[in-house]
């Protein structure tokens, strides 16, 4: 077990190093020059002033030197200074991360509870119920998040006035954004739950339990659902990790002051330090969550434990 954890951690570190190189390289090669933004106006775009800015921010150093300096600072917690806000990137993230984490956590609760419930209902009832759940989840995955956000804002925010359509600070403000973010994930979880339970119902030990006279509810809870729990938990973890990228669209639609809107603004203004930090944070969170899921899976699913 210790060896397996050490191997996973080593793989995590190697992946993060490779990812940091790709992120820094993409920002380095992106169109647009941050020097023109730092100059502050057309009257300052003289060769001497631009050269001074490049020297001040070490923008005239070779690519490898810039990357190693940025990586070394990031490892010590220094993510640089925002070109747009003239503030430390770490402080900007600290102020906005709670909103994004609250949104992701709220959405995760919604898609886990309702996704698993719909999947269990479809697998147990079958027939028209199964067809209705499959049709509904298929439709949910086909609708883009910005369309869902627009519809929810128009109906529940403007016409009915039940929920606020902008700002943050409470669960009430995060309800519509969380529903928007959770809808596509709910469809995925319901399908995985349904398929996993259908496969479990066809196994021999379930047939034996049914033949021994156990009630159907007891069979579903003790044998079918417990056996299907491994892939369900794994997919819930993977989908939760992937929600971080989905916050970009949702936060912009509902005007939430989170990491997603910070990333959009940084890209539009060529604020490379903020862009690099936010992307690195999202990738780190995704890799950390998926690694944790891989470590926890053998504890839930005996089949995964035997393969390990």
Image (tube, helix red, strand yellow):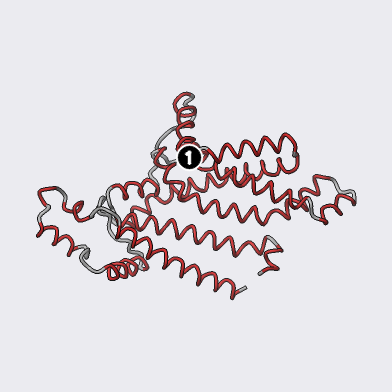
Horizontal side of 245 relative to 50 (left or right) equals right
- In the image, 165 versus 49, the foreground residue is 49
Horizontal side of 273 relative to 204 (left or right) equals left
Percent across and percent down for residue 265 are 32, 46
Percent across and percent down for residue 199 are 74, 52
Q: For the point 54% across and 43% down, which residue is it?
A: 182
Number of numbered discs visible in the structure rendering = 1
Horizontal side of 22 relative to 45 (left or right) equals right
Q: For the point 25% across and 50% down, which residue is it?
A: 84
**Quadrant of the frame with the C terminus:** bottom right
What element does badge 1 sit on? helix
Instruction: Tell me: residue 87, above or below residue 21.
Output: above
- Which residue does the numbered mark 1 point to in the structure image? 145
Instruction: Tell me: residue 212, above or below residue 167.
Output: below
Instruction: Tell me: residue 195, above or below residue 2.
Output: above
Q: For the point 64% across and 44% down, which residue is it?
A: 190
């Amino acid at each position: 077990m210790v060896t397996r954890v050490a191997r996973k951690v080593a793989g995590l570190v190697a992946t993060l190093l490779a990812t940091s190189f790709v992120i820094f390289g993409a920002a380095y090669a992106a169109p647009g020059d941050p020097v023109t933004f730092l100059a502050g106006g057309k009257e300052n775009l003289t060769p001497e002033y631009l050269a001074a800015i490049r020297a001040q921010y070490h923008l005239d150093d070779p690519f490898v030197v810039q990357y190693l300096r940025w990586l070394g600072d990031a490892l010590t917690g220094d993510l640089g200074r925002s070109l747009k806000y003239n503030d430390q990137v770490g402080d900007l993230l600290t102020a906005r991360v709670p909103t994004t984490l609250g949104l992701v956590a709220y959405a995760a609760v919604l898609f886990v509870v309702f996704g698993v419930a719909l999947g269990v209902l479809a697998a147990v009832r079958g027939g028209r119920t199964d067809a209705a759940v499959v049709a509904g989840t298929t439709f949910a995955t086909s609708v883009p998040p910005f369309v869902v956000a627009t519809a929810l804002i128009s109906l529940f925010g403007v016409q009915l006035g039940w929920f606020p359509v902008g700002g943050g600070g409470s669960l009430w403000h995060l309800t519509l954004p969380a529903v928007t973010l959770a809808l596509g994930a709910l469809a995925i979880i319901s399908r995985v739950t349904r398929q996993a339970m259908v496969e479990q119902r066809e196994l021999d030990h379930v047939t034996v339990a049914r033949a021994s006279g156990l009630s159907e509810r007891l069979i579903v809870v003790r044998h079918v659902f417990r056996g299907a729990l491994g892939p369900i938990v794994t997919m819930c973890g993977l989908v939760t990790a992937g929600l971080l990228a989905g916050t970009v669209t949702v936060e912009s639609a509902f005007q939430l002051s989170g990491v997603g809107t910070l990333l959009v603004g940084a890209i539009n203004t060529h604020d490379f330090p903020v862009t690099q930090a936010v992307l690195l944070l999202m990738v780190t969170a995704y890799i950390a969550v998926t690694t944790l899921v891989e470590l926890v899976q053998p504890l839930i699913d005996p089949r995964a434990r035997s393969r390990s």
